[in-house]
Image: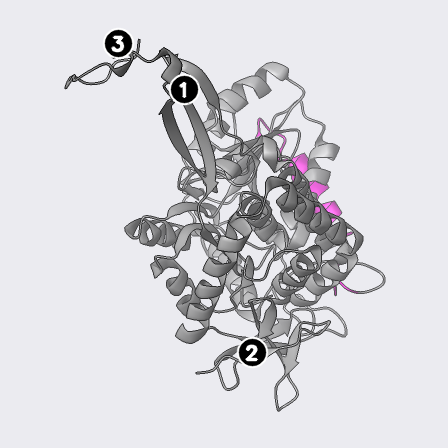
Amino acid sequence: MTIAQTTAHTDFSEQAPEGVPVVGHWIDGAVVAPAGGHTAPVFNPATGQVTASVALADDDVIAAALASAAAGQRVWGGYSIAKRQAVLFAFRELLSARRGELAAIISAEHGKVLSDAAGEIARGLEVVELACGFPALVQGGYSENASTGIDVYTLKQPLGVTAIISPFNFPAMVPLWFFPVAIAAGNSVILKPSEKDPSAALWMARLWQEAGLPDGVFTVLQGDKQAVDGLLESPVVQSVSFVGSTPIAQNIYEAAAKTSKRVQALGGAKNHMMVLPDADLDLVADQAVNAGYGAAGERCMAVSVVIAVGGVADTLQAKIADRIGRLRVGNGRDVAEPDLGPLISAAHRDKVASYVDIAEADGADIVVDGRGFTVDGHEDGFFFGPTLIDNIPTTSRAYTEEIFGPVLSIVRVDTFDEGVDLINSGVFGNGTAIFTNDGGAARRFQSEIQVGMIGINVPIPVPVAYHSFGGWKNSLFGDAKAYGRHGFDFFTREKAITTRWIDPATRDDNTHGGINLGFPQNN
């Protein structure tokens, strides 16, 4: 099959004969939209209407993407540090100036409100700014005269072609966790975005081109499982960065290991917020609502469970329920911006509802019920109302499994130790928080809790870009977390060089050393 390359339009889509836009791939500096290929629908979650279709890569498209990325990396890897840094700075300026365009694209395809979309771009921009300072993070080391007349130094070199498989919930921020670091380090990137909201990736590809990045260094491969398998199985791809559910993260980790790829696979979560009796319950209620229902709960760092310690549950439940009653749910692009928008799809909305059904069947109290929620004028949208569950049994699947929707549960315990044991007993270890005015309790919590990211009076403890993002246990597969120094270590490999130069003017028999079959020793 011949792959037709088309001129990139402002909306980064091509018109199919029936008039429905087709969102294509970005290969070798142009939109690629093979005629007659397989596609998947792209919805506006607020209206339930199909707004576009996205091309799904077949073997020919995958091969073209791999070849382009390999060629692009050979060019980009030869750029000087100064030239690479200039492109990074240019991309940073363009992204900062035009972030409003990207926020609108995200809101239209994901459904989140515009301010939330702008927030994810701002956090991604922090990683771009970190990557702009990459020379200090990829430099090697030098030891003069490590042994007599021998110097040792190290180089950090790019891996080559790297792959990113990103989720639907953060179509800009999650790719921005990885690709600025990978590109700064001299690699090329193939980004496989979610087929549910594919257009943000194309927008960023065009921005890289405007910034001066050579063609082939940033590739967007739209697709489904076939595209993922093509990246995992290809010997060209040297690393895989993934964010998504735990079962898929584990599968990617195992599959990539078979072809000796580096892997950072971030999985699911069930994040708890523990509330001690001395906490400011108005602050806690505000933060529980913010962290539980923001982005309609479609965040891996969303708070799913509030652990109420020592009799504060009744008061806290009433405060949270009161705040839920004031939340506005609607189309995220409305001029009068709501607090939260729809879920990503009808299937996901129904899945979230099924977990509330399970909790109810297991004896939990449904304090605020979001099932059957509709928005006037958007009756076909994929909306689910903020839901509050109390007295949920910790044996219920609605407690143990990730729901990924606007559902917040309350679990009641008597003591601090019970709360710590409950959190540590879970299979996930992504994020957690404690709310208290007791410094000793907070210090003990941060020491004893078996979770990768911890907030103290901070409900969503996403680290700043110069630290690293990632959890423990079934929330992370692989040794490297996202961004920070971990990111630069992940996207480079170190080469150690040992040298000896003999000065002819001082050379004698002792300098040569003669024949010695023993293992070399330093002296």
What residue sits 69% from the left and 38% below the top?
Answer: 287
Q: Is residue 165 visible?
A: no
Residue type at mark 1? Asp
- Asked if residue 213 is positioned above or below residue 265 in the image, the reply reads below
Q: Magenta span has 317?
A: yes
User: Along the line of sight, which residue is nearer the eye, 423 or 199?
Assistant: 199
Give me the C-alpha separation between circle 1 and circle 3: 19 Å
Q: Position of residue 108 (x, y in %)?
A: 70, 67
Q: Which numbered dot is residue 33?
A: 2
Residue type at mark 3? Asn
Q: Magenta span has 307?
A: no
Q: Which numbered dot is residue 510?
A: 3
Q: Residues within 10 Å of mark 1 (few under 14, many from 20)?
A: some
Residue at disc 3, secondary structure? helix
Per the rendered image, the range of residues in magenta is 309-333
Q: Give the label, 1 or 3, closer to the camera.
A: 3
User: Along the line of sight, which residue is nearer the eye, 510 or 500?
Assistant: 510
- Asked if residue 30 is positioned above or below residue 367 in the image, the reply reads below
Residue at disc 2, secondary structure? loop
What residue sits 72% from the left and 49% below the top?
Answer: 90
Q: Earlier in the sequence, mark 1 or mark 2?
A: 2
Q: Which residue is mark 1?
A: 151
Q: Is residue 64 visible?
A: yes
Q: Residues within 10 Å of mark 2 (few under 14, many from 20)?
A: many
What residue sits 76% from the left and 49% below the top?
Answer: 93
Q: Which numbered dot is residue 167?
A: none
Residue type at mark 2? Ala
